Amino acid sequence: MQIEQIYTGCLAQGAYYITSNGEAAIIDPLRETQPYLDRLERDGVKLKYIFETHFHADFVSGHVDLSRQTGAPIVYGPNATCEFDCISAKDGQEFTIGNIKIKVLHTPGHTMESSTFLLIDENGKDHAIFSGDTLFIGDVGRPDLAQKAAHMTQEQLAATLFHSLRTKIMTLADDVIVYPAHGAGSACGKNMSKETVSTIGDQKATNYALRANMTEAEFVQEVTEGLLPPPAYFGMNVAMNKKGYDSFENVLDLGMRALSPSEFEVAAEETGALLLDTRKNGEFAKGFIPQSVNIGIDGDFAPWVGALIADVQQPILIICEPGQEEETVTRLSRVGFDNLIGHLAGGFDAWAKAGKEIDTVNRISAEQFAKEVKIGESKIIDIRKESEYCAEHVEESYSKPLAAINEWIKDINPKEHFYLHCAGGYRSMIAASILEARGFRNFTEIEGGFNAIAKTDIPKTDFVCQSKVLK
């Protein structure tokens, strides 16, 4: 028996590849299936089952394509209704893979079909659970995402999750390994650890939501407290995971269409596509195609695309570094952005060499910022998360998180200059590109963000003036 966690940092997501005696199972696969097919062929094993812990909201699973390509059935827990062939297993139902078994533990609460898969080894011993979004390392799944579909409040879902954890998971032996679907950085929880593997015993000892003396009321209050609004694309990804989707190969073909600068320009005008520039923020600042939005491929690309573009049907034209086209398309497809028109052949350099119009961002160093800024007079916008702002920030700066830019951008006075920064420059360049695309030119973005600012003598404080925090 072998278990491999295939972790994708951009999505903070874990898929699992399990083999035993010539057969294999894959749990929560990513959208692109070729790596799994290659692995099956390399290992000389047959894929027997594709297990899905629930209908994912934060990414599009590869289950439909993988089933079509291998013939392996897709298995969900109870209450799962798919618009494609799948097995909606019963609570306690067991599936054999080689010499091992996978037992379905129905653990509703995050969603009503959410299930945990218990791996029973060759000796009949409980070995590990694949807990999906029911149990994370240091946290549990948020109970607010399935309210509409379940016709329940988040408090009712949280209470359901409380009982799932205590009757199905906490009763397992302390040495049972915990393999969750996500780690720190995912929007599917609020307090996840950077660790991606643990044990039942460790989680009982350290996870706030698994305290032995915790009441249901305490659990509901603590799990629902401080939940941020879910990204807008979540519901669309759930729908794709339930209904099916275009094959990844077709999406890849669309995105890999190379357009000359002239063709790219015509396509942009005719389709109204979003121009998505995935280069590093420093390169983007020096020059970019007017109206394009910068979300760098080297950062938390897919989650920010989902959070800020939101509509998975939005037509997209790609500008990226030559050679990164396939990676860009792949990572867009993982969060359901399939309506790709093509990419700019030769990247931004080809556009510039063709003599097309370019734009720039007014970016200065932290040292220059320190010379220019007048605390109490200059307006400073900090677009980091509120928790980052609360920890430490520039005195008299305003907290306006990037995730809420569509709300606070409406209050920007186009005649009032402001400085803009995040932690390191990645998020502030996203914001800068959105601001310029909407006609705002009255700002200066700080290279290196707060990390660089903190090294200057600009006054900083960890005291939060509530009037300066975006509500």
Image: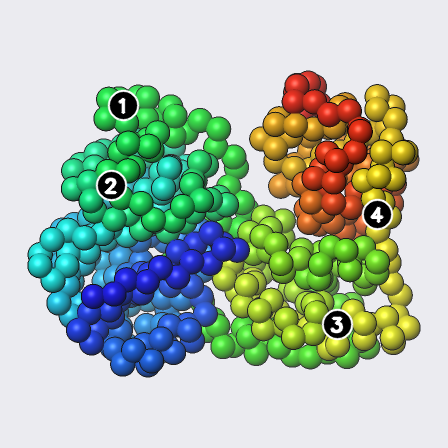
Q: Amino acid at mark 1?
A: Met
Q: Write the residue at 90% across / 34% down.
A: 372
Q: Which mark is residue 451?
A: none
- Marks 1 and 2, how far apart in space? 17 Å
Q: Residue furthest left?
A: 123
Quick check: 322 above or below 74? below
Of mark 1 and mark 3, the one earlier in the sequence is 1
Q: Position of residue 255 (x, y in %)?
A: 61, 73
Quick check: 348 above or below 405? below
Element type at marker 4? strand
Please give the residue where the numbered disc 2 appears in the rendered image. 200
Of mark 3 and mark 2, the one earlier in the sequence is 2
Tell me if mark 4 has few (under 14), some (14-19) or many (20+) residues whose alpha carbon lies within 10 angstroms of its own: many
Instruction: For marks 4 and 1, give the one nearer the viewer.
Output: 4
Tell me if mark 3 has few (under 14), some (14-19) or many (20+) residues whose alpha carbon lies within 10 angstroms of its own: many
Image quarter where the N terminus lies is bottom left
